[in-house]
Image: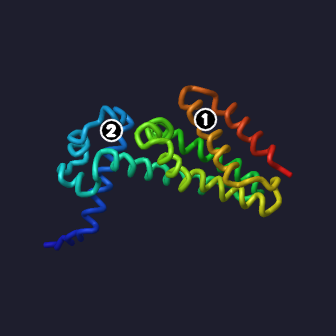
Amino acid sequence: MKATKRRTNPERSSATQAALIAAAREAFVVRGFADTSTPDLVEAAGVTRGALYHHYADKQALFRAVVEAEAAAVATEVEAGAADGSPVEALISGGQAYLAAMAVPGRTRLLLIEAPAVLGRAEADAIDARHGVRTLREGLAAAIEQQAIAPIPVEAAAKLLGAAFDRAALEIAQGGDRESCLAVLRALIEGLRR
């Protein structure tokens, strides 16, 4: 008879958090934050209410964890999609990767609509600054360092370009033409060349 290895407390804790985040993501995408109850979440995750409150102070804290996980996933996809080559081409391909990442069902709603409404603009922006805006900041800094684009204030440029990319993601999610959005975003980035 094979002995089964018992999971450690950190492993069980991690599995519970993962189950809660996955269930919460699905519920928040389908019903939205306001129409999702904590009993819905614990039932979908297959955990107890006590387990939810052991890991998260409340429904909003769990929502914050979902948004953080989604924002991190988008940043990872952007970094993976940024092509080798010129810094400007890396910015453009990173932007294309961002729009592809935002096309994952529910992401636009979670990150661009629900997050500012539930967490407040400042907190949603802080999460974005750690992830999406960070990737833009790093790409712009590299392009300036290599003298591929004009020396501009990196932080302001990252925030403004990030806002343009977010608006494009919303436009595409509402049925707008992806190629038209990409053409405009490409022109914005190309306009930064020296």
> Helix or strand or loop: what does disc 2 sit on?
helix
Disc 2 designates what residue?
A: 27
Residue located at (67% from left, 44% from top): 161
Residue in the picture at 26% in, 62% down? 13
Q: What element carries label 1?
A: helix
Q: Is residue 170 left or right of residue 83?
A: left
Question: What numbered label is drawn on residue 39?
Answer: none
Q: What residue type is labelled 2?
A: Ala
The residue shown at (49%, 46%) is: 124
User: Which residue does the image show at 58% across and 36% down from the upper left?
Assistant: 169
When the figure is inspected, residue 96 is found, relative to residue 149, above or below; the finding is above
> Viewer-proximal residue, 98 or 164?
164
> In the image, is residue 111 above or below residue 68?
above
What residue did someone put label 1 on?
167
The image shows residue 53 at horizontal and vertical percentages of 23, 53
Image location of residue 79, percent across then percent down = 60, 56
